[in-house]
Image (cartoon, grey):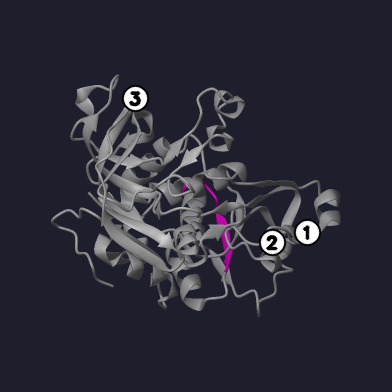
Amino acid sequence: MRAAVLVEPGRIVVEERPVPQPGPGDVLVRVASVGVCGSDAHYYREGRIGEFVVEAPLVLGHEASGTVVAVGDGVSAERLGQRVSIEPQRPDPGSIETRRGDYNLCPHMQFYATPPVDGALCDYVTIGAHFAHPVPDGVSDDAAALCEPLSVGIAAVRKARVTAGSSVLVTGAGPVGIVTIQVARAFGAVDIVVTDLDERRREIARSFGATATLDPRSDDMSAVQVDSYIDASGASAAVDAGIRAVRPGGTVVLVGSGSESMRLPVQVIQNRELFLTGVFRYANTWPTALSLLTSGRVDLDTMITARFPLENVVDALESDRVPGSMKAVVQVAPTVEEHHGTQ
C-alpha cells in the first residue's frame, strides 16, 4: 500500500508498505478521506508538539474515514463493506481511566499520528472494531473523517455545560472554533460571541451561527458577559480576556494548544468561583457527532476549502498558509462524485 511518511521535519515521502493485518477485535479499513489537523502541520514543520517528539519515520493523519475490508477474530463478517468514521484511539482497557469511562486520558493510549504510532495518511489502517463507527447514508466520506474535530467541539461544549438559553464566548475561529460554534448552537446556546484576528474567519463564524464577532485588537471586550467560555486559539491574551468575560459561577474550557504555560487572572477565577478545565481529545462523542450530522444540525462539508490526492499531501499540509483556508482534506480513495486535487 501507499503511505505518506514523515522522514524528517519538512520532508514527506510516499512509499510502499505492507498492508497491515487486523488483529483480534480489529477491522481493516480502506482509507477514503483524511482531514488535515494543525497538529499534523506542526509535526511536519517542527517534528514535535510539546512532549511528543517524532524520533522515527511517522505516518501523519488522525481524522479519517473509510470502508471495512477485512475483520479480525471475534468481529462479525457483517462489518465487511461498512463505511466507517474512525475514532483514532486504542486505550488500555485495564487502565483506571478507561474503566471509569475517561478512556481519552488513558496513560497507555495509542493514538493515530502521535509518536510512535502511525496515522491514516495511507491506503489501509487497522482499528478496534468498536472505534470504527458505521456512517449513515447521506454523510460524505469527508464529513465522516471530520467527525474527529467535531468530537473535540462536542467534548468542549459538554464541559462548558452549554444548554438551552446559554451564552458562550469562543476565541479562535479556526476549524475547531467553527465546529464548537455549531455544536454550541445545536446544544441550545442563544448567544455565541466569537473573537478572531482575521476578518474572513469572523465572517465564516457568522455564517456558521455566531451571533456576534469581535476583533480583539480593536473591539471592547469588557462589555462581554457570558455563562461559559471556550478557547480554541491557544493565545494567552485571548485566554485572559475570555476568563474575565465569564459570569460568576461560569465555566472556562481550554481547548487550543498554545504555550506550555501562561499567566491567568487567578483572583478573577477565585472571586467568581469559576470552573476551569481543559479538553484532551474526547470520549464517547461519536454517536452524538453522527446524530448532529444526519440531523443537519452541523455542516462539515461546507468547512472544507481544499481537497488533495495522497500524492499531494505536502500541499495539503501547507494549505493552512493559503489566505481563506479553513479545512483541507486528503482524499486517499475519493468517491466518484467528489472533486479532488483542487482549491
Amino acid bearing label 2: Val
User: Circle 2 sits in a helix, a strand or a loop, which is it?
Assistant: helix
Out of 19 and 240, give the one closest to the viewer. 19
Q: Measuring 68% from the left and 58% from the top, which residue is drawn there?
A: 260
Q: Position of residue 181 (x, y in %)?
A: 50, 56
Q: Position of residue 73 (x, y in %)?
A: 28, 21
Q: Label 1, on which residue? A: 264
Q: Label 3, on which residue? A: 25
Q: Residues within 10 Å of mark 3 (few under 14, many from 20)?
A: some
Q: Label 2, on which residue? A: 239
User: Circle 1 sits in a helix, a strand or a loop, which is it?
Assistant: loop
Amino acid bearing label 1: Leu
Out of 290 and 65, give the one closest to the viewer. 65
* Label 2–label 3 contact, CB within 8 A: no
Q: Magenta part of the protein: which range?
A: 186-195
* Label 2–label 1 contact, CB within 8 A: yes
User: Circle 3 sits in a helix, a strand or a loop, which is it?
Assistant: loop
Residue 187 sits inside the magenta stretch: yes
Out of 64 and 28, give the one closest to the viewer. 28
Query: What is the distance, in whole Å, between disc 2 and disc 3 at their CAs?
Result: 42 Å
Residue 182 sits inside the magenta stretch: no
Residue 196 appears in view: yes
Identify whether 135 is placed above or below 145: above
- 12 displayed left or right of 42: left
